[in-house]
Every structure is written in structure tokens, then in C-alpha cells.
Image (cartoon, rainbow, N blue to C red):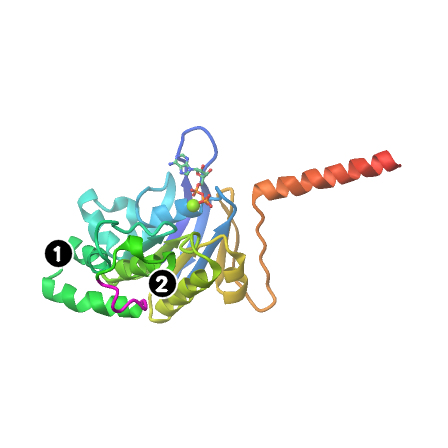
Amino acid sequence: MIDFKNVSVAYEKKGNDALKNVNIHIDKGEFVFVVGQSGAGKSTFIKLLTKEIDPTKGTVSVDGEDLKKIKHRKVPMYRRKIGCIFQDFRLLPDRNVYENVAFAQRIIEAPKKDIKKKVPKMLALVGLAGYYKKNPGDISGGEQQRVAIARALINRPEILLADEPTGNLDDKNAWEIMELLEDINKRGTTVIVVTHNMNFVNTMKKRIIQLQRGIVIKDQKMNDGDVLEIKEEKEEKKEEETKADESSVDIIQL
Ligand SMILES: Nc1ncnc2c1ncn2[C@@H]1O[C@H](COP(=O)(O)OP(=O)(O)OP(=O)(O)O)[C@@H](O)[C@H]1O
Ligand SMILES: [Mg+2]
């Protein structure tokens, strides 16, 4: 359903490409983790799917439709296929939980009757039945992310994109959100999750797509016994420096 063919993205004419010749196929119903160091191109990958950006080279297609060819006025229609959640939840602070979820339905001009039926269903699905009247500022981060998930799912998208959805949450809430995403995937939605958290990747045994400086360096299903470790470049450098220091100590001692 999702196809990347020789996709490159250059934000600037000079400088490095954010994605380089990426070829990926994701089937309907898959659960995929996208991993890699900061700046590797993970959010760029997500932004291609939401059509916030178009590739500089190559094609991105969803259900056989080349996203670059979608006319401006048809983009909102395409976006109905997709639900998005982010690290910072992005809820409307001055509206209550019910209105935040209903908002996604109002945008597509769903009948009031449908909204009234669907919002409570979605809130129950994410474990927030009875939270209608609360404001985003008065609930926990984990609960805010659940509201965001309810909002992302209410228009029944085929694909749920999550860019670091647990980045602002403590371990317990992060796991609960990840389990919820797994549950949503089991109900049939294709789920793509960008994460830095190797605990999820190494425990949940899903397909991983690893980017490094814009290149796909790994695309595999994690199996029992597989362990993935990704160090940020800063950490790598520090380790190299320590090693260099240690070896210079050796030389001095010699
Ligand atoms: N709007 C932009 N203009 C110019 N360069 C950009 C823009 N957005 C991203 N980049 C660059 O493209 C590269 C990939 O960025 P991207 O945001 O996709 O990385 P990421 O893997 O999501 O990183 P992080 O883990 O820090 O969120 C980086 O080098 C970044 O600096
Ligand atoms: Mg990012």
C-alpha cells in the first residue's frame, strides 16, 4: 500500500539530502518502527506520507496513487487516509477532550449525529470514557496522547503515523501508549512509529526500518535474540574521544 521508489529529499539545493534513494514497501496492516539517529531523516519520511513535502526525486505512492500528482484541492481528501500523532500531542488547549476529538470530524463535515455517536466510542477505545469535559491542561501526558490518538483515529484512517509519540512520556505511560498502538494495529490499521526508544524495538519484535544520514541501512523484522542499539552521533564521538584519550595514556605509560 505504501511504496517509496528511489526517493530523495533535498531541503536545500546545496548540502546533504535528508533522504537518499530510499526504496521501501509497506503492506496494509503492518506495524513498522522507523529508527535512526537525530537528523537521520525519520520525520522527513513521515512528512512525505502526509504530503507536507514532496520528494525531490523518485515517487512516493499510497494505494497506487503517486502523491506528487495529487492536486492541491484533493490533498485534504488524501489526508483522510492518514491519522497522525506527535511527541507534543498538539491538542487544542482551549477546548475540552470531547471537542478535541470531535474537531477531526467537524473538519470533514460529518453529521452531528455521527459525531455524537463516534466520539464516545473512540474515547472508550483509548481508555478515556468519562473524560469528555476535562481540558487538555488538566490531564496527564499519557492521557493527552490518548486523546490525540482518538482524534487521529476517529475518521477511520488506513494508516496511523506516529512521530516519537512517547518522547514526552515516562516509561509506564510510554508503554501504555505503545500497547495501545499495537492494539490499534491488530484491529487492522497500518501503524508506522518513529522512535528513539530501543526498549520498544527490542521487546516488541516488529519490522524496523533504520535510517542513517538519509539512507536505509537496515530493513528487517526483529526476531528473538536480535538486539538493536543506536547511539547518537554525539555519544559515538565522545566514546571515540575517550578511546583516543585512553590510548594516549597508554603511549605516555609506555
Ligand atoms: N525544513 C528543513 N529545512 C532544511 N533542512 C531540514 C529541514 N527539515 C529537516 N532538515 C534536515 O534534514 C535532515 C533530516 O531531518 P529529519 O527532521 O527528517 O530528521 P529526524 O531523523 O526526524 O531527526 P530527529 O530524531 O532529531 O527528529 C537533517 O539534517 C535536518 O537538519
Ligand atoms: Mg524527527
Q: Look at 30% across and 46% down and name the residue there.
A: 51
Q: Could you tell whether 128 is left or right of 242 in the image?
A: left
| Residue type indicated by callout 2 | Thr
**Cα–Cα gap, marks 1 and 2:** 25 Å
- Residue 240 at x, y percent in the picture: 68, 40
- Whether ligand 2 has any atom under 8 Å from the Cβ at mark 2 is answered as no
Give above or below for 15 relative to 130: above
Inspect the magenta stretch and tell me whether residue 52 lies in it.
no
Q: Nearer the viewer, residue 34 or 218?
A: 34
Q: Look at 48% across and 62% down and name the residue there.
A: 207
Q: Residue beneath label 1, please?
A: 109
- Quarter of the figure with residue 143: bottom left
Determine the quadrant in which ligand 1 lies.
Answer: top left
Of tags 1 and 2, which is closer to the observer? Answer: 1
Q: Residue beneath label 2, please?
A: 190
- Of callouts 1 and 2, the N-terminal one: 1
Give above or below for 91 relative to 10: below
Q: Which quarter of the figure is the N terminus placed in?
A: bottom left
**Circle 2: element type:** strand
